[in-house]
Image (tube, helix red, strand yellow):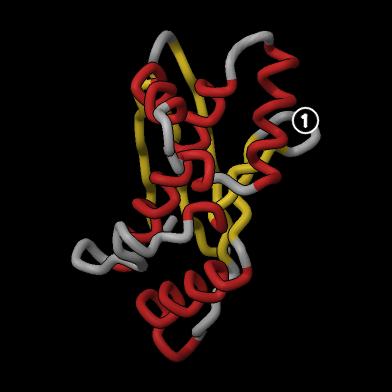
Amino acid sequence: MLGVGHDVVDVRAFEEQLGMPGSRMRALFSARELRQVRMRAEQKHDGEAVHLAGRWAAKESVVKAWCEALGAAVSPYTLDDTPWASIEVLNEANGCPRIVLGIDVESRLRKSVGAHVFGDAKPEPDLRWLVSISHDGGIASAVVMLCAQ
C-alpha cells in the first residue's frame, strides 16, 4: 500500500451547493458519473445528492492517497487546477465502485509515484485503486487505497 485517503461529506450541505444558482459543482463530475448517479438514484428511490456526495468523498480520498504516496509535503495538484472530472468514480456492473483516471491524470500519477517511490528502477509502476463508499443518515464517506502491484 502506497497511500490511503478518507473523506466525509455532509450530504445536506453538498445538496445545497449543487442547487445554488450558478453552481459549478456538477462540472466536477464526468458525464458518465452523472449518468450513473441518475440511474442509481432512480433505482434506489432516493436523491442524486447522496450518491454525488459519496463520489465526491471518493475523489477527495484519491487525492489524499496520492499525496500520502508522494510524501506529506508534496501534492500532485493545487486546489485550483485539480482535474476533478478526470478522476472518475464509476460503478461496475455489480454496483461496486472503482476509480478511473483520465489519460493525463493516470500518466501524471504513474510518473510522480514511480519517481518518488521506486526511483529510476521502475518509473511507471503497476498501480491499483481500492475504494469503498458508504452513507448513513446525512453523511457520505469514502476510503481509498493506492496500491502497487
Looking at the image, residue 111 lies above or below residue 64: below
Q: Secondary structure at mark 1?
A: loop
Counting every numbered tag in the picture gives 1
The quarter holding residue 91 reads: top right
Picture residue at 47% right of the left edge, 60% below the top: 83
Picture residue at 40% right of the left edge, 60% below the top: 82
Camera sees residue 143: no
Of residue 31 and residue 65, the one placed in the foreground of this image is 31
Where residue 98 sits: x, y (%)? 63, 44
Picture residue at 29% right of the left edge, 65% below the top: 75
Looking at the image, residue 50 lies above or below residue 70: above
Looking at the image, residue 137 lies above or below residue 85: above
Q: Is 48 on the left or on the right of 81, as rendered?
A: right
Of residue 49 and residue 59, the one placed in the foreground of this image is 49
Where residue 94 sits: x, y (%)? 77, 30
Where residue 95 sits: x, y (%)? 72, 29
The N terminus is located in which quarter?
A: bottom left
Residue most toward the right? 93
Reading the image, the residue beneath label 1 is 94
Residue most toward the front? 21
